[in-house]
Amino acid sequence: MRGARRRIPQRNRAKALSRDGAAGDRGAGALYALTAYGIWGFAPIYWVQTRVFPAPEVLAYRVIASLGVALLFITLLRGWRELGAALRSRRSAASAVLAALLLGVNWLTFIWAVQHGQILETSLGYYINPLVNVLLGLLILRERLNRAQTLAVLLAAAGVAIQTIGHGELPWIALLLAGSFGLYGLVRKLGPAAPLAGFGVEMLALAPLAGLHLFHLTGRGDAAVPAASAGLQLLVAGSGLLTAAPLLAFASAARRLPLSTLGMFQYLAPTLSFLLAIGVYGEPFTRSHASSFAFVWLALALYFWDSLQRTPRYAAELRSREPTSLGGPT
């Protein structure tokens, strides 16, 4: 009949709702990913403000603040059972302690580098991190590299060599950041603890070291943060929230996006840091820097192209090589 309302079959209606829901999840996932990697990319702005304090003291307060925030979220998300299971398991506890030490090295290196005007080198470190993951897979997990992956690793090594020759020393900050975070991701991948519980155990493992350091500084009368203004003290205390916010956003993105899509966002953070170093903080960008970054970018482009060529295995590739734990690059 003319004018009669056309009825949509129930099955088609369900499919349409499913597609809309999936599209909504992907859109929300993209926003969460942008939030996480955006915060990580702009994080140097925050840590630059702490340069009036020694990096180890800032790290100690960051650990204490992060522990408080982690326990808060574990309470809100009802994760105490998972945390208890991780603490009772020797394997979980041992892997968490090792991961905690690697994360502490990564955080300390990053904070020190930003405080000393080395944001550009931190950017280089997180650019080469995916290729370090590939190399770790070869050396530790006995994975095989194809020609494209081998060429990508060699190109990245050439970029590091160019900067070493141009400046007369290894870019140790970049290598230490990439190496520590790559090993951290590997330990978290092999460890049995769930992401949030694992992060809580890591902060519990680092907290005694942080507390001892602060106690030692106070005993010597060298503690800088307690003598600072209220604004600076609040800035340091807020480091726990700065640590937790992108982690939760990343976890939300990981639940909504395919890992292949999520992997595309990982280059946003070092790109933002790169732009900050050059455009805001005026760090020198020499010819050797340009050549070094060009080789690394070419290596990443080759690595990413090769990953896309091997779709649909790309998601499994990222799951095995990219750290999906709640650790965060900075």
Image (cartoon, rainbow, N blue to C red):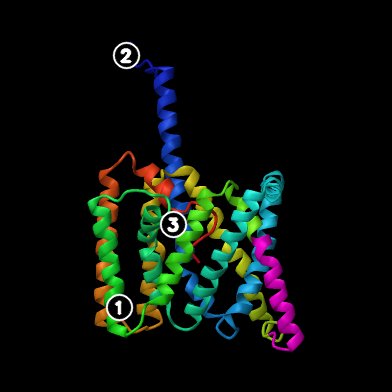
Between 143 and 260, the one lying in front of the other is 143
Between 302 and 280, the one lying in front of the other is 302
Query: Residue drawn at (44%, 65%), measured in percent from left and top?
Result: 179
Query: Residue drawn at (40%, 28%), measured in percent from left and top?
Result: 16
* 1 or 2: tag closer to the N-terminus: 2
For the residues marked 2 and 3, what is the alpha-carbon distance in whole angstroms?
49 Å
Q: Nearer the viewer, mark 1 or mark 2?
A: 1
Q: Badge 2: how crowded within 10 Å, few (<14), some, or many (20+)? A: few
User: Which amino acid does the dot numbered 3 rest on?
Assistant: Leu
* Image coords of residue 106 (percent x, y): 51, 68
Asked whether residue 122 appears in the rendered view, the answer is no
Q: Badge 1: how crowded within 10 Å, few (<14), some, or many (20+)? A: many
Q: Which residues are magenta?
A: 203-223
Query: Residue drawn at (66%, 75%), measured in percent from left and top?
Result: 234
User: Which amino acid does the dot numbered 2 rest on?
Assistant: Arg
In screen coordinates, is 195 left or right of 34? right
Q: Nearer the viewer, mark 1 or mark 3?
A: 1
Looking at the rendered structure, the secondary structure element under dot 3 is: helix
In screen coordinates, is 16 left or right of 187? left
Image quarter for residue 313? top left
Outermost right residue = 219
Residue corresponding to mark 3: 34
Between 213 and 309, the one lying in front of the other is 213
Residue corresponding to mark 2: 2
Q: Are marks 2 and 3 in contact (CB under 8 Å)?
A: no
Q: Nearer the viewer, mark 2 or mark 3?
A: 3
Query: Residue drawn at (31%, 84%), measured in percent from left and top?
Result: 167
Name the dominant secondary structure of the magenta segment.
helix
User: Which amino acid does the dot numbered 1 rest on?
Assistant: Gln
Asked whether residue 155 appears in the rendered view, the answer is yes
Looking at the rendered structure, the secondary structure element under dot 1 is: helix
Residue corresponding to mark 1: 163
